Image (cartoon, rainbow, N blue to C red):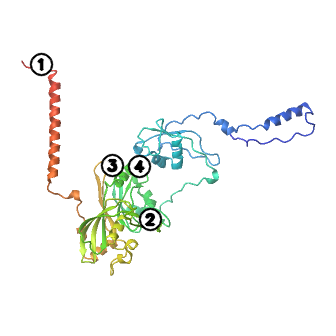
Amino acid sequence: MKGRPPGKPSGPSRGGKPGGGAPGRARGGAKAARARKPDAPRSLAKTAAKPAPAKAATPKVAAPKAAAAGKGVSLDVRQFRVGADDDGIRLDRWFQRHLPDIGFNSVSRWSRTGQLRVDGARAAPGDRVAEGQLIRVPPAEPKAVETTKPRRVRPELSEDQISFAQNMVIHRDAQAIVINKPPGLATQGGTKTDEHVDGLLDALEYELDQRPKLVHRLDKDTSGALLVARTARSAAYFAKAFSSRTARKVYWAIVMGVPSINDGMIELPIAKQPGTGGEKMHVDEEEGLPARSRYRVIERAGNRAAWVELQPHTGRTHQLRVHMAAIGHPIVGDGKYGGKEAFLSGSISRKMHLHARRIRVDHPDGGRVDVRADLPEHFAASLISLGFDINAGDLPLDEEIARAPTREDEKKAARAHAKQVRKERRGERRSRGSGGSGSPRKK
């Protein structure tokens, strides 16, 4: 119902003295007086009654309706049933997935004022929701039409872009895709970055008809294995695996010089370097975050260079690059951290020689994803030029090395065996007790 502007005055009466005139005019004057009284706007009168809650709906099935232009946003309370793909995620993440137009500030305000509810109880943005729970979303605040920004629409991919993206795929199953990212392609967009993996993910929907999600990243000039999740459930699972460091990542690098220790652990805290706008990191013993990187020398080319395997045990920005430069062996081609000393003469490429060779992570449906990515052309050519054997690079992980059992292993095995024996004996006693109650005793 269209409302008229409140408080619009009526025109003055014509002719006659105050209190005089024909009776008809006196009635007209009374009408004018009544018209000047401020009436409640019809739109507010319409919503004075408590709105009836909408029926519970799964966000995937019934997304909230967008506000009509020029008429504000729907003032109805909305309710949503948590689906299986959202089981265990934070409440603020649920809003990001299903109601992205509602910002974190609104969610926090609704939580503080008690308007945001899960199964009728007050909820905080950091609370985790479970499948089947009912989320009550209060009425959205109306926004001024002139400040409403159009939703960002991703450009449609060309046939060449789709082909390029799908040619990067080296592993695909129902929950995960692993691509071999080429050097020079950013993982995500940013300032002056138009081409990136995130912008190509529409090409990797395949039969699921849903856009894959990034769960970790590689630097722009780093090549190799990059895993993307195909469903919301697997995205939460893999993201947790990478953040908790249960996922194993193995890198290959060519470094300047040869480390004095063949198998070492670098433990140096890392922080953003002041004056670089967060674009560069450095070792900071006082304010840096803990960072640990393991390296193993695979082969060496005299004292000129070494081919090394790198395993990050933490996930700091540019961690491997900062650590190798800090011990005096910058990665070949990494001018950002190695300066002019990070380049070899001759036929060796000036590109970055850092490659994510292998990803090994538990799969949400059981088993593991264990994938190796082939080297880019410039890296493989450099190995050959330096006389390295490309087939010698895949070293076994510690847990893959067969070794003789230690004394501690034997103690653990003995304790486990004793525990199993006690469990079996308890089971036998229970079975004898239950069996004897119903059978006659022998005399």
Q: Quadrant of the N terminus?
A: top right
Whole-Å distance between the Cαs marked 1 and 4?
60 Å
Q: Where's residue 184, x and y in %?
A: 41, 69
| Residue indicated by mark 4 | 232
Point out the frontmost of discs 1 and 4: 1
Q: Nearer the viewer, residue 155 or 251?
A: 251
| Residue indicated by mark 1 | 440
User: What amino acid type should be assigned to the residue bearing mark 2?
Assistant: Asp
Disc nearer the start of the sequence (1/2): 2
Identify which residue is drawn at 75% across, 38% down.
Answer: 38
SS type, badge 3? loop
Note whether 275 is above or below 110 in the view shown.
below
Q: Where's residue 381, x and y in %?
A: 31, 74
Q: Where's residue 81, x and y in %?
A: 46, 39
Whole-Å distance between the Cαs marked 2 and 4?
28 Å
Disc nearer the start of the sequence (3/4): 4
Q: Is residue 386 visible?
A: yes
Q: Nearer the viewer, residue 40 or 348?
A: 40
Note whether 341 is above or below 313 in the view shown.
below
